[in-house]
Amino acid sequence: MTQALFGQLLVGLINGSFYALLSLGLAIIFGLLDVVNFAHGAQYMLGAYLAWMGLTWLGVGYWVALLAAPAAVGLLGMAVERLLLRRLRGLDNLYGLLLTFGLALVVEGLFRQAFGISGNAYPVPPQLAGARNLGFMVLPVYRAWVVVASLAVCLGSWLVIEKTRLGAYLRAGTENPALLQAFGVNVPLMFTVTYGFGAALAAFAGVMAAPVYQVTPLMGSQVIIVVFAVVVIGGMGSILGAIVTGLGLGLLEGLAKFLWPEVSGTVVFVAMALVLLLRPAGLFGRQR
């Protein structure tokens, strides 16, 4: 009984780590650029596929992929912001949502056409293979790495945005870009890099997810609705809210799978409905 409980909580914590990473990228892009980035799931899928293609076709290992795939997706994201999203700045959020939703459908369709919908396995790197017996449960080393690496990336991103001069520039650019540009800051470039960083976070999550889940064109669309629910519960644009809520909802899912497996798939949306009723701006959000 105890091992089953801790096993489900571990699964929930791993899922929560991916929720936190993905919702962090979404929150950064929405909070700083005011863009509802529905392409985030496709960028997550792209990261996983780049890792898989690098290993299968070129023999590129996990550790190189963990750096190269997010960098490639980040550069692609910067091109999308520069060529497409920038033209929508100042318009209603709905335009950005529709554009990124369309991009996600195109990318997913291309990968479905090229690879089908069957899953592709990605092996755990040898350095992180095996498991440790903790007495009350068996802990796979790779799962522990996923949790630690996700927490480190989330905490580092939060510190940069909330505690550094660069983060202050980003927040000021959101409030008054014209004034910030008058002080010599290249605001358009800053926005482009910010979107690229959010896309790279999604790809980083995708590479880490590749050894845990099957690499498939549908993996992004399967998780994006839950991640949007996490962002809504945490508060749209709240960096801290995205991290805390992602991890918390992952654990809640794990607990629900142990206590009442039939409702585990809907517990996130029940939580979202309750939060919206009691606190429409989200747990950490501010009324806009």
Image (cartoon, rainbow, N blue to C red):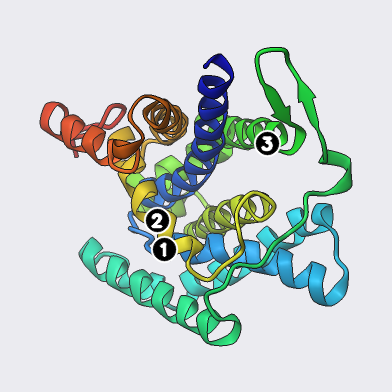
Q: In the figure, 212 relative to 9: above or below?
A: below
Task: Locate residue 155 relative to residue 101 in the image: left or right.
Answer: right
| Residue at figure coordinates x 59%, y 30% from the top left | 155
Residue linked to disc 1: 221
Q: Is 200 situated above or below 46? A: above
User: Which residue does the image show at 39% across and 71% down from the upper left?
Assistant: 85
Tell me the SS state at disc 3. Answer: helix
Figure check: 279 above or below 72: above
Mark number displayed over residue 224: 2
At 41% across and 42% down in the image, what residue appears? 172
Q: Specify the amino acid type for callout 1.
A: Ser
Q: In which quarter of the image is residue 189?
A: bottom right
Q: Residues within 10 Å of mark 3 (few under 14, many from 20)?
A: many
Residue kind at label 2, given as amino acid type: Ile
Helix, strand, or loop for circle 1?
Answer: helix
In the drawing, what numbered circle is on residue 143? 3
The single residue placed furthest to the front in the displayed view is: 1
Alpha-carbon span between mark 2 and mark 3: 21 Å
* Residue with the most extreme left position: 277
Point out the frontmost of discs 2 and 3.
Answer: 3
Q: Where is residue 150 in the image (x, y as percent from the top left)?
A: 62, 37
Q: Residue furthest bottom?
A: 113
Q: Nearer the viewer, residue 23 or 27?
A: 23
Residue 213 lies left or right of residue 267; in this view the side is right
Near-viewer residue (154 or 60)? 60
Q: For the residue carrying disc 2, how many other residues have a C-alpha within 10 Å: few (<14), some (14-19), or many (20+)?
A: many
